[in-house]
Image: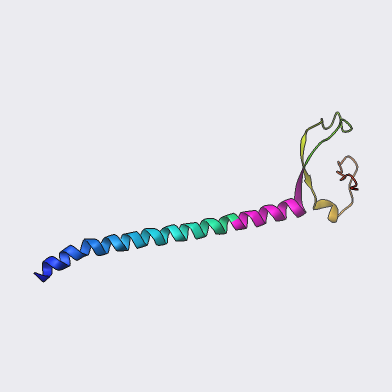
């Protein structure tokens, strides 16, 4: 009689264990996904703030080298260590106010 009770309780126990396992796996997956998103966001912020920055060309002043609405990715790090050289393009931000 006890053997039958043990056999009947095994599937219920396994179901609970599997459901807990699924819930814990889902929680671990969610935690890892959040970590990845946070680290990627921090990395993008650092890269865009200090290393590379995107710009659109406004106006025709840079033709024929750059056309209006061209998309440029500007290196912000190089000129912290050396002066611009002849032939290099330097991007200025317009004054505010």
Find the residue positioned furthest to the bottom: 2
Closer to us: 28 or 87: 28
Residue 41: quadrant of the picture: bottom right
Task: Give the residues in magenta.
Answer: 38-54
Residue under the point 49% across and 57% down: 30
Residue 35: quadrant of the picture: bottom right
Find the residue positioned furthest to the front: 97
Q: Position of residue 54 (x, y in %)?
A: 75, 43
Q: Position of residue 25 (x, y in %)?
A: 41, 59
41 displayed left or right of 73? left
Question: Quadrant of the image for the N terminus?
Answer: bottom left
Residue under the point 71% across and 56% down: 46
Residue 39: quadrant of the picture: bottom right
Residue under the point 73% across and 51% down: 48
Name above or below for residue 60 compared with residue 37.
above
Residue under the point 76% across and 47% down: 53
15 displayed left or right of 97? left
Q: Main secondary structure of the magenta part?
A: helix
Q: Position of residue 7 (x, y in %)?
A: 16, 64
Q: Position of residue 80 (x, y in %)?
A: 84, 55
Residue 86 magenta: no
Total numbered labels:
0
Closer to us: 29 or 77: 29
Find the residue positioned furthest to the left: 1
95 displayed left or right of 19? right
């Amino acid at each position: 009689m006890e053997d039958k009770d043990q056999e009947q309780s095994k599937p219920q126990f396994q179901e609970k264990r599997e459901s807990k396992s699924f819930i814990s796996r889902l929680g671990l997956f969610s935690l890892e996904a959040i970590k990845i998103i946070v680290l990627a966001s921090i990395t993008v912020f650092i890269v865009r703030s200090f290393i590379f920055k995107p710009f659109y060309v406004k106006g025709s002043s840079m033709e024929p080298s750059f056309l209006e609405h061209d998309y440029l990715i500007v290196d912000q790090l190089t000129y912290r260590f050396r002066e611009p050289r002849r032939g290099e393009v330097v991007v200025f931000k317009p004054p505010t106010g």
